[in-house]
């Protein structure tokens, strides 16, 4: 069976736009909600939202590829690249690279797409790598670019991309198509455009490594250019929780120009990412109200509560323990017990369990 790129006029994708109208309408409705709430945030809260989303997306897009990064390091690097105060901690090259790429997408979303755009992202992403033959250019190896799973004795080829000799021409067509859609007022609807842009790029798979992360970066750029402002999406975060469905939807196009299944999946996942962003904005508003309400707590308590908020919507997995509190503050066991009891008494925290199973959670209900 032929791979999709082996078909004549393979990039003339077919789909039923009527199936996506409601998704497109919901997409723009959510944009209105997000920016309506964001417009009322104070500058510090808006800065925190930007940092939180960029950090979460950097962590999640890496996690999708099986690369687990440290939140604090990525966030520190993002703050540095945004020109904000950071703690100047030592950051690993891969953490610094993904942080730099995320900030570049945010700050330069409106630049026309070009080979140089992709090469720059690839250089950032491959920061510190010594095992990649070509960095900052399209792949050039003679071996097939294949996506394989299974063991060495019985590998299964899920997909084979166009040969390296064909990549530059394919990318030239992709870039021309992309910029035409951006410049044309009557171009594709935003959601369809972003979904096809991602699929188109992943089919070509132009780099030795980093194609998934760069392909998802392209979605952020596409959406931002369409709505003419940096997008506050949590796409990678949601995909990371739906990896199997994500890869299944992409693989549905391995041999066919019919991309309906992919676009329907992409539409649903993008709307879900917007809902997650709306929750993040609400969480930041609650954080601001929380510290206004509990403004007379001591320095140790404030440090721990800020640390919990830094974990995002999910908070500490399983809740805050006394051991966590001691680790964060360096306080004695007696001081930890007293501080936690005070936070529970004023209803800043709720308490569950007993003895060593006691856990504490932020109380955001009464704000």
Image (cartoon, helix red, strand yellow):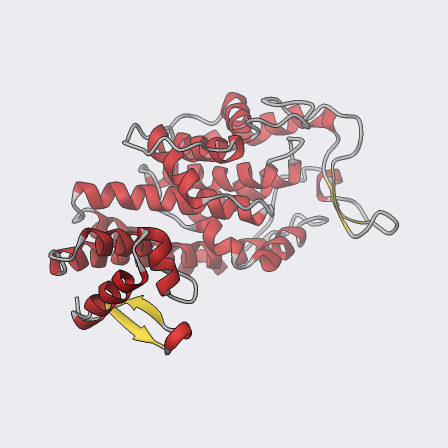
* Residue drawn at 23 percent across, 56 percent down: 301
Q: Is residue 130 above or below residue 56?
A: above
Query: Foreground: 76 or 182?
Result: 76
Q: Is residue 184 visible?
A: no
Q: Residue 230 at x, y = what percent?
A: 33, 38
Q: Is residue 244 visible?
A: yes
Image quadrant of residue 126?
top right
* Residue drawn at 67 percent across, 27 percent down: 132
Counting the numbered discs, the total is 0
* Residue drawn at 40 percent across, 60 percent down: 22
Q: Is residue 199 above or below residue 99?
A: below
Q: In the image, is 211 to the left or to the right of 326? A: right
Q: In the image, is 173 to the left or to the right of 339? A: right
Q: Residue 80 at x, y = what percent?
A: 35, 30
Image quadrant of residue 276?
bottom left
Q: In the image, is 247 to the left or to the right of 166? A: left
Q: Residue 290 at x, y = what percent?
A: 18, 59
Q: Residue 257 at x, y = what percent?
A: 66, 47
Query: Foreground: 358 or 311?
Result: 358
Q: Residue furthest right?
A: 153
């Amino acid at each position: 069976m032929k791979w999709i790129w082996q078909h004549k006029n393979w990039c003339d994708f077919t789909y039923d736009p009527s199936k996506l109208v409601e998704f497109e309408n919901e997409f723009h409705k959510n944009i209105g909600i997000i920016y309506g709430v964001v417009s009322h945030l104070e500058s510090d809260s808006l800065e925190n939202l930007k940092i939180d989303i960029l950090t979460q997306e950097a962590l999640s897009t890496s996690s999708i590829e099986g690369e687990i990064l440290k939140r604090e390091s990525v966030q520190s690097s993002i703050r540095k690249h945004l020109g904000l105060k950071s703690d100047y901690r030592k950051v690993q090259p891969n953490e610094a690279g993904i942080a730099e790429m995320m900030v570049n997408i945010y700050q330069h979303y409106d630049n026309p797409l070009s080979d140089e755009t992709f090469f720059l992202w690839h250089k950032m992403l491959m920061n510190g790598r010594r095992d990649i033959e070509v960095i900052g250019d399209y792949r050039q190896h003679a071996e097939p670019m294949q996506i394989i799973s299974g063991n060495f004795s019985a590998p299964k080829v899920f997909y084979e991309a166009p040969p390296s000799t064909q990549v530059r021409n394919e990318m030239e067509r992709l870039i021309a198509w992309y910029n035409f859609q951006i410049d044309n007022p009557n171009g594709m609807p935003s959601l369809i455009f972003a979904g096809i842009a991602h699929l188109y790029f992943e089919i070509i798979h132009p780099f030795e490594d980093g194609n998934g992360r760069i392909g998802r970066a392209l979605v952020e750029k596409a959406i931002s250019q369409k709505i003419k402002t940096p997008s506050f999406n949590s796409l990678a975060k949601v995909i990371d929780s739906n990896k199997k469905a994500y890869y299944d939807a992409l693989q549905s196009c391995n041999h066919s120009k019919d991309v309906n299944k992919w676009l329907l999946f992409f539409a649903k996942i993008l709307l879900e990412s917007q809902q997650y962003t709306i929750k993040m904005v609400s969480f930041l508003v609650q954080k601001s109200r929380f510290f206004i309400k509990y403004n007379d707590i001591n320095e140790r308590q404030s440090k721990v509560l800020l640390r919990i908020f830094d974990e995002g919507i999910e908070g500490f997995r399983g809740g805050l323990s006394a051991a966590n509190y001691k680790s964060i503050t360096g306080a004695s066991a007696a001081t930890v017990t007293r501080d936690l009891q005070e936070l529970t008494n004023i209803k800043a925290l709720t308490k569950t369990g007993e003895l060593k199973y006691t856990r504490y959670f932020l109380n955001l209900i009464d704000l």
